[in-house]
Structure formats: structure tokens, C-alpha cells
Amino acid sequence: MAILKQNKKSHLKKNMFFDEGVDIARYDQVKYPQIDKITEKQLGFFWRPEEVDVSKDKADFNKLSKHEQHIFTSNLKRQILLDSVQGRAPNLAFLPIVSLPELENWVETWSFFETIHSRSYTHIIRNIYPDPSHVFDNMLDIKQIIECGQDIATYYDDLIINNNGPTNKKEHKKSLWMCMMSANALEGIRFYVSFACSWAFAELKKMEGNAKIIKFIARDENTHLAGTTTLLRLMRKEDKEMDKIAKECEQQCRDLFIKVIQQEKEWAEYLFRNGSMIGLNETILKDYVEWIGAKRMRAVGLTPPYKVPLANPLPWTEKWIAGGNVQVAPQETEISSYVVGGVKKDVDDNTLKGLSL
């Protein structure tokens, strides 16, 4: 694939995928301004893990019961694996077949923010655990984690294989559709059992630094969810064959989402196998997963397999998901090295010795 291209076709007349590759990265005129707006929104959310002070979390963690420590550490392991996949996969799978500059820019931005998430988990681990290897070295030994990772990777691998070799055009488009559906389910469902646990700890005034980082991550994932949902709708609208494929794959997509929901339920069982925590248990988490899963399925035109209440079973999570209110700038976060109006107590009579006004 050539890096420098000279296309004859206007970028305003190309399809999102499978057309001439991107030549000039121009954003003054874009075919799909809604994609560009999602990128701008995501860039406006830029943050760094070091902006959040998690030093108090170490003392909090040591005060947790053994089963609460199991819940917290297990969730970290699963989140690390999910974002390890998602940090590299969109670039590898989607960029080779992208045809529009605004879409190329979105995919690159999406992947970049996933790497911020991965770095944030290392930031948390360094500050809480004496030996980070305690978290990293055995995460692939947990059956529920590796099964989840393999299911996600399968759809990306299938698309990458089709990108790299001679393939039937319809099958290639089908692999793209299924991969985008899988990414949508990942961004919209797979993290939320772990998210709810992190926020439940914070509701008890425990592990609050971690919870704020998870709030930043949830805000990003909501943006990625908006991106994949928008792409799925536009792909059907601009390409009649893709619309036909979407209809043919409806049951397959439905099965995909149902499996994701089931895996989240199984993860809740694994987390709470030794006991629950105040404000959260396995049963209510399963209700929450069904509720949010049904919401995500309807958003991409799929019928949920069950009826769920209109109200969120965990209404207190709404304030954590309302990401637009999260402050990111350094002066607005709890960085221990950035205190405005604070008093540093290591100043003595000799500190200013030799200075004159």
C-alpha cells in the first residue's frame, strides 16, 4: 500500500471504505462532518493519567477486605486486556481500507485515546501495588478474561486477513460490518461491570483516584461508542450492498451482542464469588448489564432478547457517566505537585538567604 497517493476522485465523492485511499489530509471540506465533530469532541477531552492523584488509593486498598481486593484487582486485569487489544486493533484493521481523511483521523484518534487508557492502568498499579507483576503476570490465566479477549480479537483478525489477501468483496464487507459491530459492543457494554464496581467503591469514599480515572475512560468510551454507532448507520446509508449485508447478518449480530452480555454476567459472577460489597452485588449487576445491553442493541437497530425496565437499575452511576462535567486541566485536578494557593511547609529561615529585592 503506497503512503503517498495521487487520487483522481474527489474525497467528497468517495465512500468511507474500500474506495481510493486517502491522499491529502484536508478538513476544510469533509464528506461527513459528523465524523469530524466526534474527533474534535474527543480531542477536547485530552487528559493524562498523571493528572489524577491516586496516592490515597494505596491506603484505601490495604483497608479493603480480601474479596473486595479481588474485585478491584480482577477488574484492573480485565480492563488492561481489553484496552491492550483496542489500543492497536482499530488502526491495524480499519486504516488499510479507509478512504476519507476525516475517518482516517477519527480512527487514529480513537486508537490513541485507548493507549491513554492503557497507560492509566499502569499509573494506578504503580501507586497501589508494591510489585506490579502481581497484576500483570497472571491476567491471561483467568478463563473469563482470555475468552473475552479472544472473542474481540476474532473479528479484528478476520478483517485483517481479508485486508491482506485476495478475497470476495462481499465477504470483505461482511467482515468489516461484523468487526464494527463487535467494536460497538466492546465500547458500549464490555467495560460497564468493571466501571460500576470502581464507582461503587468511590461512593463509599474508597479508591477515589481510580474512580476518577475510570470516569475519564468512560467519557472516552462513550465517544468511541458514538463513533462506531455513527459509522454503522452511515455505512448502510451510503452503500446498498452493505445495507443488504447488514440485513443478512442481523441474527449473527444479535447473537454477538447476546454473547457479550452473557460474558459480562459471567464476569459479575467471577467478581462476587467470594462476597459482595456495600451497594453492589452480582444480581443487580446482571440487571444493569441487561439494561445497558438492550439500550446498545436498540441503538444499532437490533431487537433485545428480553424486556428491561426503562429506569437504570443503578441510577447513581449516571453522575459518573455524565462525562461532560469531568475536569481535565491540571489546575482543576488533584495533582499533588500542582497546588494553587497551597502552602509548602519545607520553607525555613535559610531558604531565601542571599536573595535581595
Image (cartoon, rainbow, N blue to C red):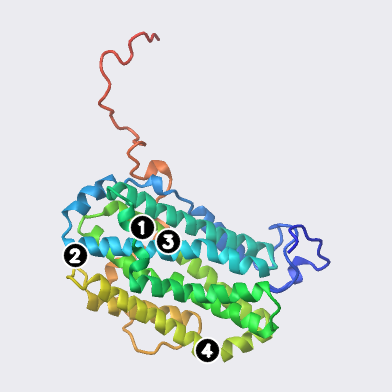
Q: Residue at x 54, y 66 (%)?
A: 89
First-in-chain label (1 vs 4): 1
- Nearer-N-terminus badge (3/4): 3
Mark 3 and 4 residues: CB-CB less than 8 Å, in contact?
no
Q: Which residue is mark 1?
A: 136
Q: Can residue 274 be seen from the camera position used here? A: yes
> Circle 4 is placed at which residue position?
250
Please, what is the three-letter code of the amino acid marked with disc 4? Glu
**First of labels 2, 3 by sequence position:** 2
Q: Residues within 10 Å of mark 2 (few under 14, many from 20)?
A: some
Pair 2/1: label in front: 1
* Gap between marks 3 and 1 measured at Cα: 25 Å
Residue at mark 4 to residue at mark 2: CA–CA distance? 40 Å
User: Quick one: SS at disc 1?
Assistant: helix
**C-alpha distance separating marks 2 and 3:** 28 Å
- Which circle, 4 or 2, is nearer the viewer? 2
In this view, the residue in front, 154 or 217, is 154
Per the image, label 3 sits on a secondary structure element best described as helix
* Residue placed under numbered mark 2 in the picture: 67
Q: Is residue 16 left or right of residue 252?
A: right
